[in-house]
Amino acid sequence: MDTNELRHKLDEAGYIYDDTLITTLSVALKLGRPLLIEGAAGVGKTEVAKVMAYALGRELVRLQCYEGLDESKAIYEWNYQKQLLSIQVGMGQNSGLQNMQQKTSLDTAELTRSLFSEEFLLERPLLKSIRSEKPVVLLVDEIDKADEEFEAFLLELLSEMQVTIPEIGTIKAKSVPFVVLTSNRARPLSEALRRRCAYLYIKYPDIEKEVAIIKAKMPNADSRLALSVAQAVHDLRENDNILKKPSIAETLDWMAALEALGAPDLTPELVTSTMGFILKNEEDMEELAAQNSCECGEHTDGKVCEDHGKPGHHCGHHHH
């Protein structure tokens, strides 16, 4: 897929992109390189993998990382229930043969080998992604939440497109997935991992881009309201007292809530009554409520007052 085709597909999906993003995606795809995307939580890193799955017409295989993630959850696991059942069946057959004194006991070593064969193997996301008959998009989401040891399992797949299972051996890829790794930078990633990947850093969108995202996802949204919401969200993200910065998804949730209320504009009253759609913890809601109660009394458009840090017009009042 060339750059123009990719642009067309992303436009079709309503995805807002810039030249850096489209170039990085296109080149990584052509070279078969994994793509590491870093940025703050909520900037849309995961969405890149989803929209690429759509653009390429591929299945999205997702591995959500967390502390303690190991190969049994990421690469493969043995079907223990099926193994136990096989052992019980084998023991039953063995008992019958002994009673009839027709054959010797089952070969224990052979039984053990048979229990760790393809028949009893359960695929997890990493193994599934390379054993798929058709290429997939593999999303390794929030890799920074996994332990450093997990990266060692991942490096073999990223470098050689294969995984090694001790009981079976090396399993090479039937198809090559397009791999997207995301990180919120909760911990530094190894240089070995970074060297194997193309790299992209995504920031929160500026006001103009956020308005474009709102309009792309909600074509019938009121333009004036969309601008007010984008400005208010931008100001919340710039506020150091807000602990959990609003994500793009939360911007869309807030816009949808305001549209559902038939709001023509973003007023202080609407900010107060709908803040649960944009802020997700008590401390941030209290901070916004305090800002929204600025005594200058001139808040009508949801913008932040420079003097008081509240949603409202720049009132010009100074309180010392």
Image (spheres, rainbow, N blue to C red):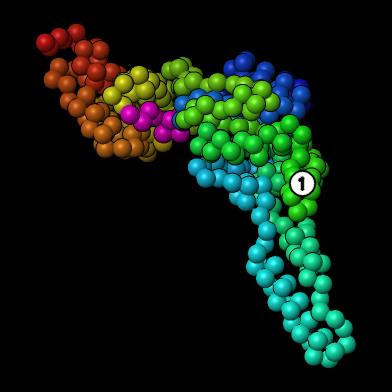
Q: Quadrant of residue 114?
A: bottom right
Q: Which residue is mark 1?
A: 131
Residue 119: percent from left, percent from top: 77, 61
Within 10 Å of disc 1 (Cα), the crowding (few <14, some 14-19, many 20+) is many
In the depicted view, which residue is nearer to us: 162 or 13? 162
Res. 198 image quadrant: top right
Q: Answer whether residue 248 is magenta in the image.
A: yes
Q: Nearer the viewer, residue 11 or 239?
A: 239
Residue 177 sits inside the magenta stretch:
no
Q: Is residue 73 visible?
A: yes
Above or below, comparing residue 156 to residue 98 in the picture: above
Q: Secondary structure at mark 1?
A: helix
Q: Residue at x 80, y 90 (%)?
A: 99
* Pick the front one: 109 or 282: 109
| Residue at 67% from the left image edge and 18% from the top image edge | 23
Q: Quadrant of the C terminus?
A: top left
Left of 174 or right of it: where is 304? left
Q: Tell me: 193 left or right of 307.
A: right
Q: The magenta stretch spans which residues?
A: 243-252
Residue sticking out furthest to the right: 102
Spot occupied by residue 109 in the image (x, y as percentages of width and height):
79, 66
Image height check: is 282 above or below 196? below
Q: Residue at 80% of width from left, 42% of height from top?
A: 172
The location of residue 262, given as percent across then percent down, is: 34, 35
Task: Locate the N terminus and report the quarter of the image it occupies.
Answer: top right
Residue lying at the far left of the rendered structure: 320
